[in-house]
Image: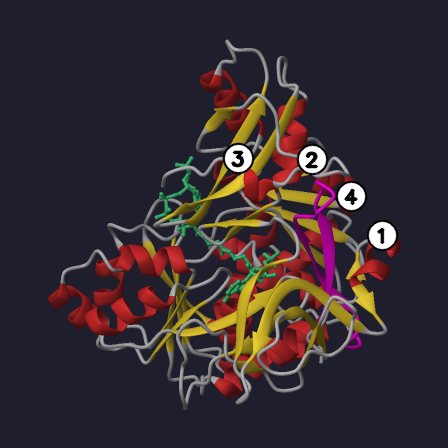
């Protein structure tokens, strides 16, 4: 399926209908019809072409949630170009790596870009686009054509680009639309960043494929959220567990009134504590639907819309997705037995950009190794218990300790270091650094250096000085033996 054709049902088919409510950079709430969005995307496609973007070329986009993000995304699909979103919290070290790896034709940004490359300021691009023709732009493409390159933190310390095809996104969107009963009558309130597949795949693609009304927030702001619910009256809301923990602060009457219009709350990207699901049900009268996904596979397992949403589980495989749990020997594990989840299906990505070895390692005979550990119940519900790697998820953002460890080891005085997860009530987990170094090691200085070089969510919340790191006979640090930190 060519995404431009899938989106045309809304962009061209519902041209006169309001499709998007968003805040302009000046903070004004603006409503665009699907026709206006389509015209903006067509103009943008022409402006990108004029600057040299061609089919198969990469476009890096380093923008917060705003209308131009959407124009650029649709424009790339119309041109057959590869969209490369970059987390706006990334600093030079992180963003620079993506640019060097993706070799984009352009990097669209609203302000300073923390790195070097062909910078295309979004305002200049929009001005160029505004005088160009709004007629349809279309490139015939097969469903196997690449649509986006989404970087996901690698266990090796540098992130790898997951190459997602038109078919991957289309299958994900049609699965969610079908399974969650999404129609043009819905209204989605979306506070998630569009630079990750949660916001982009589940939010933007289901919206454009089904034609409902979307209100896009620049980001989730705890203090403003109740007013947004009341004003917009959404029928659907997609969030990460941290957002649901924040919503639990609302008083009972606000919780009930502000969310009376909602028929579906979805949580994903990190484990939703069973207690949060129960507390949310008691306070809000809604049972959150928890689902599981990965950048490489988009959504794969979800609790049912109709039927039991079982707390602490991620539900059952989505249509077309095959799941196998394998024990340490690689044999299929029976129900109730834990092992690593392997996945197969039309949702699974092509491979990592220019990393054939990493791609080979990620697959076993066509089955994708998720690195997640879990088990399946007799009646087909999956429970995730942990991960093969020491990935930390904080507020739904992924952190690979190795990346922070490598940075800290470059700092003067740091002889050895281990970064591990500490539990956190709101963010789920936060990173903490255990440092072997001189007795006068300056934690405040280390924190400042991290803040300057790494995305804010990766900055360790504590720097704990230790005499040595616990290692096994092979010299590998045994993180579970590090002294625990109080949350
Ligand atoms: C967080 N911060 C941000 C943003 N989000 N800054 C700018 N724009 C953002 N969108 C920074 C803040 O500056 C702050 O930095 C820190 O993060 C926490 O912010 P705070 O206001 O205290 O917010 P919070 O109440 O803790 O909530 C954070 C959040 C955010 C809104 C839940 O973490 C978030 O948007 N998470 C969603 C991530 C996501 O979409 N993941 C999907 C990955 P400082 O620490 O310096 O104060 S895709 C995925 O995982 C798979 C495929 C899947 O299954 O979906
Ligand atoms: P990413 O690398 O951003 O694609 O994040 C994917 C990872 O997020 C998965 O491998 C899981 O470890 C985790 N994840 C996503 N959804 C859930 C969930 N509902 N429960 C637990 N972990 C999740």
Q: Earlier in the sequence, mark 4 or mark 2?
A: 2
Quarter of image, res 480 = top right
Disc number for residue 111: 3
Q: Earlier in the sequence, mark 2 or mark 1?
A: 2
Disc number for residue 101: 4
| Residues tagged 1 and 3 counted as in contact (Cβ below 8 A) | no
Disc number for residue 354: 1
Q: Earlier in the sequence, mark 3 or mark 4?
A: 4
Q: Is residue 178 left or right of residue 20?
A: right
Residue 447, x across and y down, in percent:
49, 24
Judging depth in this view, the residue of 471 and 174 nearest the camera is: 471
Can residue 134 be seen in the rendering of this structure? no
Q: Is residue 262 left or right of residue 479?
A: left
Disc number for residue 96: 2
Disc 1 CB within 8 Å of nearest ligand 2 atom: no
Which residues are drawn in magenta? 140-165
* C-alpha gap between disc 2 and disc 3: 15 Å
Residue 34, x across and y down, in percent:
48, 73
Looking at the image, which residue sits at the far front?
A: 473
| Residues tagged 1 and 4 counted as in contact (Cβ below 8 A) | yes
Q: Earlier in the sequence, mark 1 or mark 3?
A: 3
User: Which image quarter has ligand 2?
Assistant: bottom right
Disc number for residue 160: none
- All told, the count of numbered labels is 4
Disc 3 CB within 8 Å of nearest ligand 1 atom: no
Q: Secondary structure at mark 3?
A: loop
Q: Is residue 66 left or right of residue 55?
A: left
| Residue sitting at x 23%, y 65% | 231
């Amino acid at each position: 399926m060519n995404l431009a054709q899938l989106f045309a049902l809304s962009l061209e088919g519902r041209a006169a209908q309001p499709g998007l409510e968003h805040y302009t950079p000046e903070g004004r709430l603006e409503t665009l019809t699907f026709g206006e969005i389509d015209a903006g995307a067509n103009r943008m496609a022409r402006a990108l072409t004029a600057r040299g973007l061609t089919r198969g070329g990469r476009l890096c986009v380093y923008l917060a949630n705003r209308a131009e993000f959407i124009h650029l995304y649709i424009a790339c699909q119309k041109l057959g170009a590869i969209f490369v979103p970059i987390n706006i919290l990334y600093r030079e070290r992180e963003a620079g790596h993506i640019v060097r790896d993706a070799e984009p034709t352009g990097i669209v940004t609203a302000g300073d870009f923390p790195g070097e490359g062909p910078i295309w300021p979004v305002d200049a691009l929009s001005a160029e686009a505004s005088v160009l023709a709004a007629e349809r732009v279309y490139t015939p493409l097969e469903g196997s054509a690449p649509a986006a390159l989404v970087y996901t933190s690698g266990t090796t310390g540098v992130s790898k680009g997951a190459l997602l095809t038109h078919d991957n996104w289309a299958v994900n969107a049609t699965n969610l639309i079908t399974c969650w009963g999404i129609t043009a009558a819905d209204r989605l309130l979306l506070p998630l960043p569009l630079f990750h597949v949660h916001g982009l795949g589940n939010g933007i693609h289901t919206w454009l494929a089904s034609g409902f009304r979307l209100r896009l927030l620049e980001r989730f702001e705890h203090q403003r959220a109740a007013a947004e619910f009341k004003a917009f009256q959404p029928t659907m809301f997609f969030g990460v567990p941290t957002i649901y923990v924040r919503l639990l602060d609302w008083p009972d009457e606000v919780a009930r009134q502000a969310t009376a219009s909602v028929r579906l709350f979805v949580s994903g990207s990190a484990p939703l504590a069973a207690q949060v699901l129960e507390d949310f049900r008691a306070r809000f009268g809604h049972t959150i639907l928890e689902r599981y996904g990965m950048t490489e596979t988009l959504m794969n397992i979800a609790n049912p819309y109709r039927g039991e949403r079982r707390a602490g589980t991620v539900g059952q495989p989505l249509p077309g997705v095959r799941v196998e749990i394998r024990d340490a020997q690689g044999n299929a594990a029976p129900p109730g037995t834990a092992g690593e989840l392997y996945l197969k299906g039309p949702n699974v990505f092509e491979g990592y950009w220019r990393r054939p070895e990493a791609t080979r390692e990620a697959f076993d005979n066509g089955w994708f190794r998720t690195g997640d550990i879990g088990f399946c119940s007799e009646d087909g519900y999956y429970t995730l218990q942990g991960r093969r790697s020491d990935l930390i998820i904080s507020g739904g953002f992924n952190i690979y300790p190795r990346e922070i460890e490598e940075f800290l080891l470059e700092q003067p005085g740091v002889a050895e270091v281990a970064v591990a997860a500490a539990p956190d009530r709101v963010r789920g987990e936060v990173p903490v650094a255990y440092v072997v170094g001189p007795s006068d090691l300056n934690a405040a200085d280390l924190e400042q250096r991290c803040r300057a070089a790494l995305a804010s969510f990766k900055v360790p919340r504590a720097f704990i000085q230790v005499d040595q790191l616990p290692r096994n006979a092979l010299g590998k640090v045994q993180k579970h033996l590090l002294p625990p930190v109080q949350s």
